[in-house]
Image: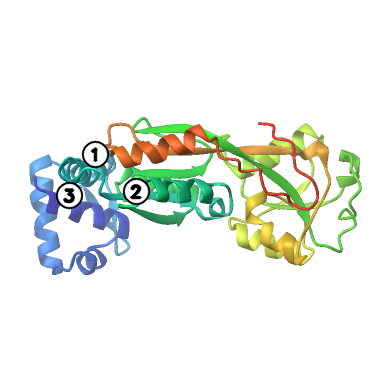
Amino acid sequence: MDIEEIRTFLAIAELGGFTRAAERLHRSQPAISRRLVLLEQELGAPLFERVRGRARLTEPGRIFRPYAEATPATLKDGHEAVHAAIHHARGAVSLALVGTLADTHIVDVLRDFAQKFPDIDLVLRTGSSDEVTDSVRCGDATLGLRYFAGGGLDLVSRDVGAEAMLVVAAPTHRLADNREHAARDFAGERWVGFPARLHRGSFGHVLARQLAAARLDNAEITAIDSLTAQKRLVQAGFGIALIPESSVREELRLGMLAVVNAPVLRTAVPVTVVHRRNGYLSPAARSLLALMTREALRLDGVPSGKGQEDQQN
């Protein structure tokens, strides 16, 4: 098999169809089909089945996918390793991060890195925590900065800090009065939050855990899988929310949201940096990783205007 067959397989798997894969790869659909047939013949198993006009992975296809995803990343690592050996401190380092983390101390870390390595091109991209992990896994990013641990035996995940979670409400909400509120004050309140996941590494789990610890297990939670939508619903008075501090700084500054002083619900979520376990880390990438690890990102360093939340996890 060759790299073009691998790229063809990955494009079909990601896009769910031959036509869109052909468009992405700038090839004809018959050419795409031929490459896939060659790959399937070599592997001795069909990799896709057509269901309602879509190409879905078969069981052999699902088994093969993680190995295929590692191939482009490995080749990219080899290219970067050779490039670094030839050009020494020149080149690029790619970092994927959750967008809200750009409003934290990470900006100072990136500034220090740019000053220390002026010949290095620091390439940034943003996404959700899962998207950050996917970018690292497939080689689109060398390092990733996300909330919670980025899973997988093929990845290394290191804690580099923690970010405070704030209870926020509309400015006119009865609890947005600067007073310290006990658990009983939240009885009957409706919450807006992410769907609860089975694993611990999710904002939905954090909210459920904190409510249970405060004996508010019966609280009504409206599951919204969008942080922006959560903030807008809270702003409109639809409910209250437990949200990362960096994601609401602008709304708090503009008076669109207010912090509810609730010691019983105080918590923090871990922030981790991830990279491929067997991936190549250039000297510059290692320096950036060391900066993030050594300085233990002061993610709670910007005042919220209502007092800092204690960091517990």
User: Is the Cβ of the residue at disc 3 closer than 8 Å to that at disc 1?
Assistant: no
Q: Residues within 10 Å of mark 1 (few under 14, many from 20)?
A: few
Q: Nearer the viewer, residue 120 or 143?
A: 120
- The secondary element bearing badge 3 is classed as helix
Q: Residue 141, which numbered label?
A: 2
Give the residue displayed 44% in from the left and 33% down from the top.
157
Q: Residue 67, which numbered label?
A: 1
* Residue type at the position of mark 2: Ala
Give the residue displayed 89% in from the left and 39% down from the top.
182
Residue identifier under label 3: 6
Query: In this view of the protein, can residue 198 be seen by the observer?
Result: no
In space, the residues marked 3 and 1 are separated at their CA atoms by 10 Å
Which of the two labelled residues, at mark 2 and mark 3, occupies the earlier sequence position? 3
**Closer mark to the observer between disc 2 and disc 3:** 2
User: Is the Cβ of the residue at disc 2 closer than 8 Å to that at disc 1?
Assistant: no
Q: Residue 244, which numbered label?
A: none
In space, the residues marked 2 and 3 are separated at their CA atoms by 19 Å
Q: Position of residue 304 (x, y in %)?
A: 74, 51
